[in-house]
């Protein structure tokens, strides 16, 4: 049997609620809807850390960030870790990255001065074909194109530094990063890939992450009046870090009209991506690749888009940050079109390896959903998901704030979530389909009844009526913490075991 091709499509900073497949009435995404028709929508998929690099690093190693000792957005994968493309390359796959990286180091020396692992998991060791892209419109192969440079410079100048900076990019769509990534992918499929090998391609769009801007017709495609808005969160009873983020995002001065405009631009960026995916899927059909390709679409984390009085991503655990789209199509799949089985992005590595017939590394902590895709009746879904965030230290308090943006378009101070201070203060969250518990190292906590309060407005952490639920979830989180403790290195120092003794003395 031929090994399947593997296409992992990832956007940056896109929550599940942005898609019609997850109930959004304002944004149609025909290409993704067609993908879902021949595959499955995972309704309850979650990232393992609400920031780019930790989430991507966890996804590509199948290991939690606390295991990786990777707990900040400026940290990348330890080159000694075993990664998904590394395993696939050893198993005969041609590997490619087209788009944003923010996971793999370019050189191992930066992590291991004086000594490099024998087989480092670094960018150019694990990917055969590398075409990178940055936020804005810079894409390898087009960085000297005057039109692309003009599009990028406009985005940086007008939409990058302020918390809610946004706008209509005057550049033609064909000079913008999403289009150029599509052209790079089409060229790879038709002219670059080795037809004698199966391929694994990570098509990684930097959008709809900031800067919130896109060209026409996408910038005006969604009427702000049609954009669904989250309910207002008064932040009463919420941890202080939420109130700090609210102030540092200058959201206390943002009105509904501004948030609607931001959301409409954000949705336009997503529709631009969907139109490019339609071209890519059509080319795969033309080349006869679709029938033997696993296609997965997801995002690394969400964007609050005004929910809970904040914008972008932050060091806490609302679904607007952590609930991500996950749509999968696999050759021969004939199961349900939707499932509420909880899954984590950490599950992507073992899933793709199992579908490829490749070995899953012994330190992998994710759980493959390949048995579900293959219709195995013995498949047992996760009972809950766990999300981690933050660095060691005492988080910033409201009383610590002496300098902040005066309004959401204040360009004197860069967005709060980009500062290291915003991520100080560790936390973990455990989420079932019914409840979510968030615990923080400084003693604060949150507990939400997701059936009665799906928007996570009423914190019931200290509610006596919920004490039993809180205790049960705390116990589950403690057991999870012990269970996920790193299994590496494997213990080969002691050879004796009960089984070896039975065999030696012929005991039954």
Image (cartoon, rainbow, N blue to C red):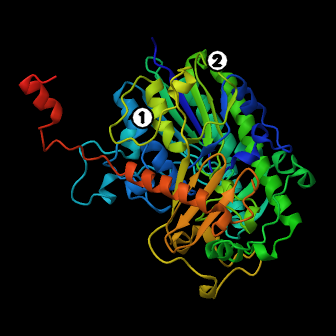
The quadrant of the rendering that contains the C terminus is top left
Give the residue at mark 2.
334
Residue 320: x and y in percent read 69, 55
Compared with 507, 218 (above or below) is: below
| Residue nearest the observer in this picture, 120 or 500 | 500
- Quadrant of residue 404 within the rendered picture: bottom right
Residue 257: x and y in percent read 89, 64
| Residue 128: mark | 1
| CA neighbours of label 2 inside 10 A, class few (<14), some (14 to 19), many (20+) | some
The answer, for residue 170, to whether it is visible in the render is: no
Q: Which residue: 36% across, 41% down?
A: 125
- Residue 12 appears left or right of 501: right
Q: Please tell me which of labels 1 and 2 falls first in the chain.
A: 1
| CA neighbours of label 1 inside 10 A, class few (<14), some (14 to 19), many (20+) | some
Task: Name the secondary structure under disc 2.
Answer: loop
Residue 159: x and y in percent read 72, 64
Furthest toward the left, the residue is: 505
Gap between marks 1 and 2 measured at Cα: 33 Å
Compared with 408, 193 (above or below) is: above
| Residue nearest the observer in this picture, 154 or 430 | 430
Furthest toward the top, the residue is: 1
């Amino acid at each position: 049997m031929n090994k399947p091709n593997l296409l992992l499509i990832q956007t940056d900073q896109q929550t599940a609620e942005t898609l019609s497949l997850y109930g959004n009435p304002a944004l149609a995404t025909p290409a993704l809807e067609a993908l879902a028709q021949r595959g499955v929508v995972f309704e309850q998929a979650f990232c393992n850390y609400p920031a780019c690099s930790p989430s991507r690093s966890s996804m590509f190693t199948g290991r939690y960030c606390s295991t990786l000792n990777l707990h900040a957005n400026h940290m990348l994968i330890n080159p000694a870790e075993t990664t998904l493309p590394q395993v696939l390359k050893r198993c005969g796959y041609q590997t490619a990255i087209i788009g944003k990286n923010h996971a793999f180091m370019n050189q191992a020396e930066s992590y291991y001065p004086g000594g490099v692992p024998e087989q480092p998991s670094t960018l150019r060791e694990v990917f055969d074909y590398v075409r990178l892209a940055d936020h804005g419109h810079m894409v390898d192969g087009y960085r000297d194109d005057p039109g692309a440079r003009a599009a990028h410079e406009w985005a940086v100048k007008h939409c990058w530094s302020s918390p809610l900076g946004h706008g209509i990019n005057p550049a033609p769509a064909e000079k913008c990063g999403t289009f150029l990534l599509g052209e790079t992918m089409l060229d790879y499929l038709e002219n670059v890939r080795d037809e004698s090998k199966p391929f694994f391609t990570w098509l990684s769009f930097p959008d709809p992450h900031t800067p919130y801007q896109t060209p026409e017709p996408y910038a005006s495609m969604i009427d702000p009046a049609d954009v669904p808005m989250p309910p207002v969160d008064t932040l009463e009873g919420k941890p202080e870090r939420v109130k700090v983020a609210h102030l540092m995002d200058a959201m206390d001065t943002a009105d509904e009209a501004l948030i609607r405009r931001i959301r409409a631009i954000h949705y336009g960026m997503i529709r631009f991506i969907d139109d490019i995916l339609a071209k890519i899927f059509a080319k795969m059909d033309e080349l006869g690749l679709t029938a033997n390709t696993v296609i997965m679409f997801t995002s690394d984390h969400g964007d609050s888009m005004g929910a809970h009085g904040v914008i972008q991503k932050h060091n806490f655990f609302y679904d607007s940050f952590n609930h991500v789209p996950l749509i999968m199509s696999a050759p021969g799949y004939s199961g349900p079109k939707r499932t509420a089985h909880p899954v984590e992005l950490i599950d992507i590595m073992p899933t793709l390896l199992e579908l490829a017939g490749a070995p899953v590394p012994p330190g992998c902590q994710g759980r493959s959903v390949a048995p579900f895709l293959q219709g195995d009746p013995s498949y047992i879904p996760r009972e809950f998901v766990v999300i981690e965030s933050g660095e060691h230290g005492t988080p910033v308090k409201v009383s610590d704030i002496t300098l902040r943006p005066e309004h959401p378009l204040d360009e004197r101070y860069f967005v709060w979530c980009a500062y290291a201070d915003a991520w100080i203060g560790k936390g973990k969250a455990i989420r079932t389909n019914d409840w979510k518990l968030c615990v923080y190292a400084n003693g604060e906590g949150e507990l939400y009844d997701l059936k009665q309060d799906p928007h996570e407005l009423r914190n019931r952490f200290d509610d006596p009526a919920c004490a039993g639920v809180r205790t049960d979830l705390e116990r589950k989180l403690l057991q999870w913490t012990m269970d996920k403790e790193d299994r590496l290195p494997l213990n080969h120092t002691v050879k004796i075991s009960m089984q070896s003794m039975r065999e030696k003395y012929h005991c039954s």
